Amino acid sequence: MSVTPFLMFEGKAAEAVEFYIALLGGEISAMERRPDGGVQRAAFTLRGREYRAFDSPAKHDFTFTPRSRCSWNAPTKRSSTSSSPH
């Protein structure tokens, strides 16, 4: 199982991702933009650890998220030969 931290920004996600990579070393594996130029989804690694970032389309009273969000990725127990869930 792995945990992927999500970082929410208000218009500066791409700039932040590029800064973190320049500072800590890493690479961008995906960056999708919204029509307004904001980051819909960014996936990147820093020193071998995976992170996600996005620009919130809503306006907030803060510029960087004051809370954390993580995605838990766990292997499934399905058999690759079975079509029914276990």
Image: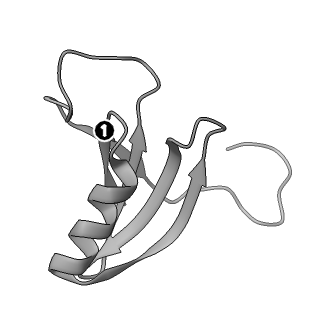
Residues 58 and 76: in front is 58
- Left or right? Give the position of 12 relative to 29: left
Quadrant, the C terminus:
top right
Image-based side of 55 in relation to 46, left or right? right
- Residue under the point 62% across and 40% down: 34
- Give the vertical position of 44 relative to 58 (above or below): below
Residue occupying image coordinates x 17% and y 79% = 24
Q: Nearer the viewer, residue 56 or 67?
A: 56
Say which amino acid is labelled 1: Phe
Q: Quadrant of residue 46?
A: bottom left
State the residue in front, 6 or 82.
6
Q: Which residue is mark 1?
A: 9
Position in image of residue 72 (x %, y %):
38, 48
In the displayed structure image, the side of residue 44 where residue 47 appears, left or right: left
Quadrant hosting residue 7: top left
Residue drawn 31% across and 38% down? 8
Q: In the picture shown, does residue 21 fall above or below 33?
A: below
Dot 1: within a 10 Å radius of its alpha carbon, few (fewer than 14), some, or many (20 or more) residues?
Answer: many
